[in-house]
Each structure stands twice: as C-alpha cells, then as structure tokens.
Image (tube, grey):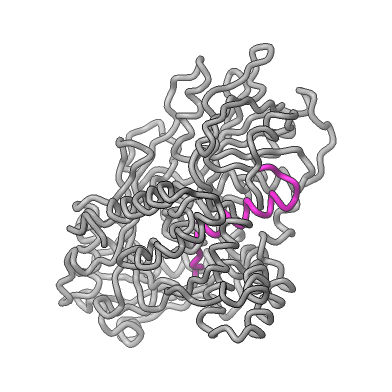
C-alpha cells in the first residue's frame, strides 16, 4: 500500500472523495473500490488516528443497548460481529464475558436471561458460544477474587476482542488493493464548487507542504469526531450535529488485578455499566470506559486524573482489597465517540449509538455516529446513497453491488493466512513471535517472512517481539510515516507497555530514517514527538516524563 502523492490526486476526476481515515471512512473506501468506482480517501492525520484506535477494542453486539430497545442496532451489530470471523479471522477473537448481577442492579437475572437469549438469536452463534446463567457460587468458582458482597450470579456469554487500529488499516489496505487511492497526512482545507455544488476539495499535504485540488463528483464526509469541522468548510453550514463524548481506558497487570474473564458491572460512582477486560496479551487487563460530554480540543484528547480515579474505583469495587492507585496503572488511552446530538438533553451515556446519513445544501454527504462493529454496513449504506447521487452528476449510472460481506479484509484470506503461518514456522521463528505477527497482520505476515528470508539480520528481535522486518513492512506496505504511527497503530505497543516501547524506539527510528530519508534532525524530532505522546497519555498517572 503506497501513499498516493498530491500530484496524482490532483491529476484526474474521481467519482468519490472520502474525507476521514477512521473505520467509517475506511469502510466506505473499501466498499466503493470493490464496486469499481474511482475513489480517493484523505486523512489529515494517520489512519485510525482518532476514535478508531482508542475504542474499547471490541467487536460486540452491544448487549446493554437492548435495555433501551435499540433492537435493530443490536441485531445488526451481532451479525456483523459473526461476519468478522470470515472477513478477518486474525482480528476477531471470541472471548467469554460475564454480565454480573448484584443486589439492586436494575436488570435482574430473569431480564438478563431474556436479553442474552435474544442476543444469541440475533448473532446466530453456534451452540458452543450460547449463553448460560450462573449462580453466585458458580460465578465465584470462575472468578474467585470478585467482590462477593451482594453477588447474585451472572450471565455467561461471548463477544469478540479485536485491535481496532489494525481493523481500520487492513480495511484501507483492502481498498487500495482494489484500486483506490489513499493518503494520510493529507488535509481537506476547503471545498471546490461547480454550479453551487461541492465538486471536490482543496488539499494540503502535511508531509511535503504542497497544496492542490482534488475534483470528485461526490464528496463524503466520514470525519468521525471532526464531522462538524468538515461540514463547516461549507460556508452555508453552521449547525452542530455531533455531541462527542469522551471514553477513557486504563491498563492494569493481572498480578495487581487478577481477572480471567471480561466482566460487566456497574460503577460505584454513577451506576453506569463498565467493564474490566483481560487483554489479548494474557498478562494485562484494561478497564473502561468513561462516557462524559467533551468540549475540549478534538486533536488532543487524553485521560485526566479524575478519569483515572473513576476507573480505579471500578477496579477496586470489582476486586476489593487490592488498594489499586495510579501507581498501579500501566497506561491509559482516551478517545471521542462521534455521537449524533439528540433533540433532548439526555445523559451522555444514554445518547444513541446509531448512525445517520444526511446531505448538505451544496451536496456534501455526511455520515455520523455508529460504532466499530457496524462500520462495514455504514460504509455500504453511505456509498449506496452516494451512488444514487452520482447518477445525477455525471458519474456511472450502473455500479456493481457491494461485496464487502464476502471479500476478506487484507490479510484475512484463509489460504494466505495458512501460507504465512508455514513461512514463519519454516524460518524457525519462536511460536510466541509467530503468533504476534499473525494476530496483527494475518496473511500479510507472509511478506514479513519473505523479508526475513531474504535478509535474516532483519529478523532479529529488538524487543517486545518487534523485528526490523516489521518496520520495513509498516513503512513500505502500511504507509507508516512517523515513529508514532509505528508504535501506536501498526505494532500496537503504545497501549500495553509502561513506557510505550520507548526502550526500542532508537533502533526503530534509525531504520525508519533510512527507509524514509530522514535527516538526523528529523529522526530526533520523531523520537521527541513519540516521547511527548507517551508522556501526555501517562501524565494523569503522575508520570509526566517517561525515560
């Protein structure tokens, strides 16, 4: 996957221009490319830079939304969750969840049983993953450290863990493989008008400083939390459509917080549903999430001390006697949910997660709201709407139907995944390193194996399972342009290590400098920027500097 230069983006006319490289934009991009449309995607930061790398990292139906009667959304999400086992098996990891019931909880065991029965029906899950109800003693047998006071039992069911940033990047890659053009660090700074209708965008390349114009018959705004900022580029638009809420997670070690199953329970602070979840890395547990209205800068969202303390209260209520404080927290991350503002003044956590599609006076097509699990459907629906508009504005009148429910994401093809596994095994790679690469890159790990076969020195481990071959792959095949791109959204080390992987940042930066032609000064700037990013996300823990 190569970054499309501004000269290429400016050279012709596209059917569609998609603004926003989160999971919604990526899904629309892949849908359009697979239909044979000439489509480009631009993102002002890196792909998955915002919400799509800072979620709860779940593919789930949203069991708690049954309580507010959002049946259509839950059914759709359950079906999409199951579909991901076929589209991206390396990124869909079924795990058992325990929806705990304590005295005073509003659901009650009977209501929870009914909800979980509906949940299983919506998903069409196999018998091995259907729910069961457990009483108090059976629940404590599975999780003996849980708070026993008032515990009635639990509903034991399944949802999926994932790596949200990896899902987004594999989706973008799939679109590029199908013929789409993409560029990260390419900002839309204004719109081009023809006959009082939006017909493209002015672009600024943040890597080169170049400016240019991309012409497209239809522009789609998939800006996530930045949806309104993109809408406001249209002079006649001033109404706010989003109500962003902030979600924060903290990471703890199992040594400090011994939990083996994901559990849903209610916060002792405000009775909201929250969930501690064992991470894909078996030694860690993350706890989330907050859900509060956010009015700060969209480009700098980090956890505050109050956010961390709220989640620590959840952890200490879940497993009492551990006396967990900020010193026990390994890392934090914070993101924004791009929720559509309701007409009423509901509490932030009660605002619907459903998406909406709407068109502006000058033809900008916008999609807002939604969630990671339903992004494929969101992409299909917004492209359906765009295709209808294209027919009236010089675009193709006949467009192929969507195939995103049948074509695997990049790296998700089972035959390629099997070939990658064999290749890494033939290289004599340690099983734990093999599994790390396969879980991150799926069948595309074959390319990393080929690089190591050609130059075995690139296969030597730097630490944390990272090799220089992986760095090569991230730069040449995944458009990693900065050190932060690699550690945060390609190799996924930022979230799970106390120092975010800074102990191997020097050799990674040195290799990226060679591959990308950085000067010594630029390499040092990249290191400083990543150190600052790690520090900003640990500052609420009393660790403003990370060495």
Query: On the picture, is 6 further left or further right than 102?
Result: right
From which residue to which does the magenta span run? 159-181
Q: Where is residue 355 in the image (x, y as percent from the top left)?
A: 53, 42
Q: How many labels does the image show?
A: 0
Taking the spot 49% from the left edge, 75% from the top edge, the residue there is: 131
Taking the spot 30% from the left edge, 49% from the top edge, the residue there is: 302
Q: Position of residue 526 (x, y in %)?
A: 41, 50
Q: Where is residue 216 in the image (x, y as percent from the top left)?
A: 69, 28
Q: Position of residue 307 (x, y in %)?
A: 24, 53
Query: On the picture, is 471 further left or further right than 406?
Result: left
Q: Is 439 colored magenta in this rendering? A: no
Query: On the picture, is 437 further left or further right than 5?
Result: left
Say which quarter of the image contains residue 311. bottom left
Quarter in which the C terminus is drawn: bottom left
Q: Which of 307 and 512 is in front in this view?
A: 512
Main secondary structure of the magenta stretch: helix
Say which quarter of the image contains residue 121. bottom right
Q: Which of 329 and 547 is in front in this view?
A: 547
Taking the spot 61% from the left edge, 18% from the top edge, the residue there is: 362
190 relative to 258, above or below: above
315 relative to 2, above or below: below
């Amino acid at each position: 996957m190569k970054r499309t230069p501004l000269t290429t983006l400016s050279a012709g006319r596209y059917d569609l221009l998609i603004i926003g490289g989160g999971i919604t934009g990526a899904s629309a991009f892949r849908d359009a490319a697979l239909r044979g449309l000439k489509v480009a995607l631009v993102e002002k930061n890196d792909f998955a830079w915002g919400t799509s790398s800072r979620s709860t990292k779940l593919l789930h139906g949203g069991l708690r939304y049954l309580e507010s009667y959002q049946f259509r959304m839950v059914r759709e999400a359950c079906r999409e969750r199951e579909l991901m086992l076929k589209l991206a098996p390396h990124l869909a990891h079924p795990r058992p969840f325990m929806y705990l019931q304590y005295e005073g909880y509003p659901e009650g065991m009977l209501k929870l049983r009914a909800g979980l029965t509906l949940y299983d029906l919506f998903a069409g899950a196999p018998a091995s993953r259907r729910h069961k109800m457990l009483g108090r003693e059976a629940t404590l047998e599975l999780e003996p450290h849980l708070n026993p006071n008032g515990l009635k039992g639990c509903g034991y069911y399944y949802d999926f863990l994932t790596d949200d940033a990896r899902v987004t990047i594999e989706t973008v890659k799939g679109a590029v493989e199908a013929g789409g053009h993409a560029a990260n660090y390419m900002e839309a700074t204004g719109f081009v008008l023809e006959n009082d209708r939006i017909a493209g965008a002015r672009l600024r390349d943040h890597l080169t400083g170049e400016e240019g114009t991309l012409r497209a018959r239809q522009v789609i705004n998939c800006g996530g939390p930045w949806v309104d900022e993109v809408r406001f580029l249209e002079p006649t638009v001033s109404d706010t459509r989003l109500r962003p809420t902030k979600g924060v997670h903290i990471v703890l070690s199992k040594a400090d917080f011994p939990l083996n199953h994901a559990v849903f329970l209610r916060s002792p602070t405000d009775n909201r549903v929250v969930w501690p979840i064992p991470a894909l890395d078996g030694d860690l547990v993350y706890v989330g999430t907050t859900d509060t209205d956010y009015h700060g800068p969209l480009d700098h969202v980090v956890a505050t001390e109050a956010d961390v303390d709220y989640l620590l209260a959840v952890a200490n209520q879940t497993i009492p006697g551990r006396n967990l404080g900020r010193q026990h927290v390994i890392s934090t991350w914070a993101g924004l949910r791009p929720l559509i503002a309701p007409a009423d003044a509901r509490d932030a956590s009660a605002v619907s997660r459903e998406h909406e599609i709407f068109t502006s006076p000058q033809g900008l097509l916008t999609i807002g709201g939604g969630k990671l699990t339903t992004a494929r459907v969101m992409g299909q629906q917004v492209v359906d709407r765009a295709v209808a508009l294209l027919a009236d504005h010089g675009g193709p009148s006949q467009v192929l139907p969507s195939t995103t429910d049948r074509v695997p994401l990049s790296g998700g093809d089972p035959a390629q995944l099997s070939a990658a596994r064999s290749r890494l095994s033939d290289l004599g790679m340690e099983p734990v390193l093999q599994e790390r690469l396969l879980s991150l890159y799926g069948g595309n790990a074959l390319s990393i194996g080929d690089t190591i076969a050609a130059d075995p020195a690139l296969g030597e481990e730097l630490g944390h399972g990272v090799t220089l071959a992986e760095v090569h792959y991230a730069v040449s095949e995944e458009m990693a342009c900065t050190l932060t791109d690699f550690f945060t959204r390609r190799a996924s080390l930022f979230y799970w290590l106390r120092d975010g992987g800074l102990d191997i940042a020097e050799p990674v930066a040195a290799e990226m400098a060679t591959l990308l032609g950085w000067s010594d000064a630029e390499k040092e700037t990249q290191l400083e920027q990543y150190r600052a990013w790690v520090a900003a996300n640990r500052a609420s823990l009393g660790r403003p500097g990370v060495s």
